[in-house]
Structures are given as structure tokens and as C-alpha cells.
Image: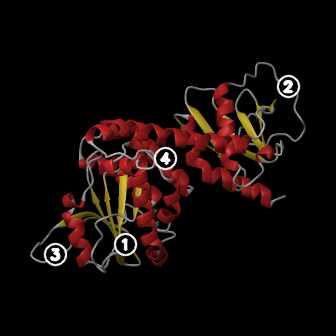
Amino acid sequence: MEFNEAVSQIAAKVRDLKDVIQTEEATKNAFIMPFIGQVLGYDVFNPNEVIPEFTADVGVKKGEKIDYALVQDGQVQILIECKKVGQPLSLENASQLYRYFACTKARIGVLTNGQVWNFYMDIDEPNKMDSKPFLVLDLLDVDETVLPALQKLTKPAFDLDSIASSAEELKYVGALKRAVASEFTEPSDEFVKLLAGHVYDGAFYASVMDKFRPLVAKALKQFLSDQVNDRLKTALGADDIKVAPVAEVEDETDDVPEDEPEKEDGVVTTEEEIAAYRIVKAIACSDVDPARITMRDAKKYCAIFLDDNNRKPVARLFFNGRQKYVGLFDEHKNCTRQPIDNLNEIYRYGDQIREEVRRLLENE
């Protein structure tokens, strides 16, 4: 299974089941063990790779246990402490992880509730786990920029030196991004003063802060909206969209016949399909002229091509059923459906879409 696909599958499982999970043990069974196995690539049933209830003597604390220790080449490399899904994560509630990090040779500490995964190292002080994570993965809001770093922590690609060399940048860039996101969601007094100070010369009494706080929040949202719209306009160019029918096939993973198909009856292209096509086009524009991305509709799915060539598939949109899917291609032209609940989730698969575009360009 592809790494990104494995992350997506666990994310879908968390989204579907998190409301029915009531205990830490159920969280481990439903989310954490599958993540260790499918995403990180460890055999959860092999005690030489995954040690549950790992015990080490820590000073006067004897017999304390941490939930999981992951082993590489006979050496404990990653320690994982678990909480119930939905429970807030803080080092105050993870004292064992903090102590075990100092008394073992593990360089990676993980605190998770199954949905959010916080990864720690000893960037600030050797052999002392940092108070802030260098990598944060929220499976219900996946930041695709952290996935390459996460992949370096998997068993097949474990590269501690590479992670260590980039951990400081990951830590601070990630923290800054979360701080910016927080300010955009709920601007702090300091941020409101900073921005309002550019347009207001008076004293910042409480009444002035109350006046500017919603104005700053509104301005931030409008700025983001304008940036997205400008990006889409640049990507899409002209407003017209070429939508032509494509022959349906018995097996949707097969190549489309090379002959130009005749127009089919009963094909209706919805506004939602057009909007999704525009998102794919906007994603692809980082690697190719957006004018080269086209769409043809059919009864089973909408096919998105490079150069309107049915031998150059970029993605497919399966929007005719109750559950919507985006179809993504691998290097062998196999199409894998990924479920989405709304069109914005297509952006989660931006890396795969761009990778397929690059493969098609390399084969020209």
C-alpha cells in the first residue's frame, strides 16, 4: 500500500469511528495499532519490532510502563504514549514518556490520542525531550507538507540522521504555521493591535479592541479568500471549460480506448464536477500550463487528462453515487479511489496529482 494511501485510510477510520470510541484501549485497537502497522510499517504482532507495555527502570520509579516501544535493528528508537481519542495532549499528562526518553536510547517520543500524533526529539537539549513537538499530524486535518518527514520515520525508510538535521526547521515552521492559523481563527490582542496600528492612530482602549477584533478577523478571511480566488483565476485562465464525453469501460482501471468516442446520451456534467475539475486544474498548474488540463465527462466518471489525451490520465471524479471519490493514478496507470466528503478534500491529494502530471511530462 502506498504511504499516502495508508494515511488516508487511517484518517477515514478515525473520522468514521472516533465518536464511538470510549476508552484508551479501544483507541489503541482501532487507531493506534493500525497506524503503527499500516503507516509506520511495523509488524504489531512481532515483539522484536513492537513492544507493548514497555518497561524500563527510571530512577526511583520502578516498573513503570510506556504503551509501545518501536525497535529498529535491536534498538528501541521510538517510544509511544497513548491517550483516549479526543483527550487533549500535553506533556503534563505524559510524564512517563518524558522520563523514558531520558533513560533509553530512543531519539523519538510520540504522544497520541489516535487522531493527533505529536512527535518529539531532543533539539533544545541533548537527551532531554523537548516540550514542543517537531512534527504534528492531525488525521482529521492532514498537513501534506509534514508527510515526507513522517515517511522518514517509517520502518522501511527510517532515517534518523535526516530527521535530526531537519527537525529544528520542522519544529519551528510547524509551530509558526499553527500560530498563524490560530491568529486567523481567533486573533489575539497583540495581533489585533499590530494590524490595527497600521490604520488607527489613537489609544487602544478596551472599546477600541472590541471594535477592531471582528474587523481584523473579517479582513483576514477576506485576504485568504482573495488569495485563493487569484490562484484559481491564474490557474484556469479563460472561464470556458472543455467537457467532452469519454467512452465507458467495463473495468474503470483499464485504459480508455485510443479512438475518439462518440457522444453518449444521458451524460450530465454537474456544477460540482466542474468545481472539482477546477481544483485539480489549480493543483496541476504548479507543474504544467493549466490550459493543458482538460476534462471529459461520462456516465461512470469524469476523466481529467493532460492535453485532452486519453492516454494521459491525470485523475478521475466518481461523483454519481452517494459517496464521492477522486481517482488517483500510480506509475502503472492503476486508478485508486479515495473517498471525499467535500471538494476541499481534493487538496489533500495534491502531491499525488502533481506527481502523476510530472510522470506524464517525463514520458513525453
Q: Which amino acid type is marked by label 3? A: Val
Residue 115 visible somewhere in the drawing: no
Q: Please tell me how crowded label 4 is: few (under 14), some (14-19), or many (20+) other residues with Cα within 10 Å.
A: some
Provide residue 301's location: percent of width, then percent of height: 70, 32
Element type at marker 4? Answer: helix
For marks 2 and 1, the one nearer the N-term is 1
Provide residue 55's location: percent of width, then percent of height: 21, 70
For marks 4 and 2, the one nearer the N-term is 4
For marks 4 and 1, the one nearer the N-term is 4
For marks 1 and 3, the one nearer the N-term is 3
Q: Please tell me how crowded label 3 is: few (under 14), some (14-19), or many (20+) other residues with Cα within 10 Å.
A: some
Residue identifier under label 1: 71
User: In this figure, what is the number of numbered marks?
Assistant: 4
Element type at marker 3? Answer: loop
Q: Is residue 85 above or below residue 163?
A: above
C-alpha distance separating marks 4 and 2: 36 Å
Which residue is drawn at the image coordinates 43% and 71% (left, top)? 167
Which residue is drawn at the image coordinates 20% and 58% (left, top)? 93
Which residue is drawn at the image coordinates 51% and 34% (left, top)? 341
In the rendered structure, the answer to whether residue 191 lies left or right of residue 323 reads left
Provide residue 221's location: percent of width, then percent of height: 48, 39
C-alpha distance separating marks 4 and 1: 24 Å
Element type at marker 1? Answer: strand
Q: Residue furthest top?
A: 266
Snapshot quadrant of residue 297? top right
Residue identifier under label 3: 58
In the rendered structure, the answer to whether residue 70 lies left or right of residue 149 reads left
Q: Please tell me how crowded label 1 is: few (under 14), some (14-19), or many (20+) other residues with Cα within 10 Å.
A: some
Checking the image for residue 263, the label placed there is 2
Snapshot quadrant of residue 66? bottom left
Residue identifier under label 4: 9
